[in-house]
Amino acid sequence: MADISVEIIVFEILTRVPAKVVGRCKSVCKTWYSLLSTKDFAKIHCSRSLISSNQRILFVGDLTCSVHPIDIQSCDYGPGTIVPFPFDDISIHSNLDGLLLVGLKRTYELVLWNPTTGAYKRLSTPDYHGFYEHMLDGVGLYINVNEDYKVLHIKRRGGVYCVSVYSRSLDSWRSIPFVTKPEYLSLSFHWSSGTLCGDILYFRVSESLVGGTNVLICFDVNLEQFKEISFPPVRSTGVFCGELVNVSNELYMFVSNGYRVMSVELWKLEEEHWIKVLACPQVSMSLDLWCTMSHFMTNGNWLLMTKQGKLFEIEMDTKPFQCFYHVNCFRLKNGAMFLETVVSPTL
């Protein structure tokens, strides 16, 4: 009976408390530590953590990083807490269920990191798997039907594509086939990080030329098959950038277009066809409208964090589209929005 009551406490009560409380509860006794460290507990706790109050903003400096809560009502962020930073300098590529996929800029290694628990796993191997090169590679983090967290790594090396998948459950890499148009091997094409939506990982492949080619490469995470779909039908009039975001398992794209005066449109993907959701008026904000960091939606509004570290808000219900305005200015450029969970980068 005592064992049953402990399991009820752990799986019915402690799966509903914040991740940091779970960490403290592990020190109660060996039984609690064992149960709180299981894959089943992490899965249930994660599913119950998918609420806005558990969203956090991570800011990365040169030697430190801080985590800030998000005030959903004011669309602002609160005072930060300094968290242990086990790396020198990183780039953040993906986040999923509290895990961040980051690249170490000094060693080029890929790392899975949970900033809430501090646990991390280096994915590099002696046979040169798990090394990321900026402007050449594309990477994405996903979970498949077997509930295995995986990393897809698309590399361009020596004029050929090398594609491999890392499995957290197996702690190993394996190569998979990939065939695409030969022109995408050109260094004029840039791969984005992957955006997971449903069972598909989407990569934006863009040619760095005015009027250049823009496509989406889609990866089915269960079938491990690739296919190509088109961009939204937007005519480029200058610098053209499309950024993907998943909202409630629906894929959207923010398309910014122009140069000194930028316009932004929001498109939604429906069965491989793009539907325009809104179009903002042209705004003289220069390249700040390149929304390359993160997006989230709350109170019926969209918030966009740009690569310059600024946050902008789009009010969805305004009649004239005088809705794109500056909310706050962030001081650090490198960061991410994530959920606080106890999901481990290792098993």
Image (cartoon, rainbow, N blue to C red):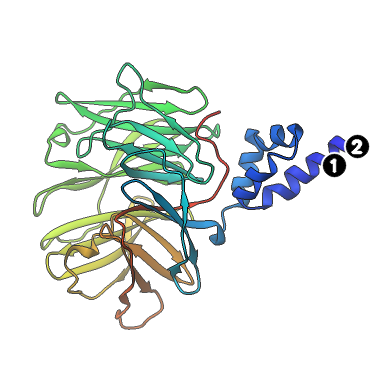
Residue 128 drawn above or below residue 239: above
User: Residue at horizontal 15%, vertical 31%?
Assistant: 182
The image quarter containing residue 159 is top left
Gap between marks 1 and 2, in whole Å?
6 Å
Residue type for callout 1: Ser
**Quadrant into which the N terminus falls:** top right
Given residues 330 and 201, the one toward you in this image is: 330
Give the residue furthest to the bottom.
319
Position of residue 240 measured from the top left corner of the image (x, y, whole percent): 17, 57
Reading the image, the residue beneath label 1 is 5
Q: How crowded is mark 1: few (under 14 residues within 10 Å), some or many (20 or more)?
A: few
Look at the numbered disc 1 and give the secondary structure of its residue: helix
Say what amino acid the circle numbered 2 marks.
Met
Left or right, 66 with respect to 187, comes to: right
Q: Where is residue 276 in the image (x, y as percent from the top left)?
A: 31, 65
Task: Give how far across and how far down residue 217 sits, in percent.
Answer: 29, 41
SS class of the residue under badge 2?
A: loop
Which quadrant of the view contains residue 184? top left
Question: Which residue is disc 2 drawn over?
Answer: 1
Return the residue nearer the eye: 89 or 172. Answer: 89
Where residue 309 sits, quadrant-wise, is bottom left
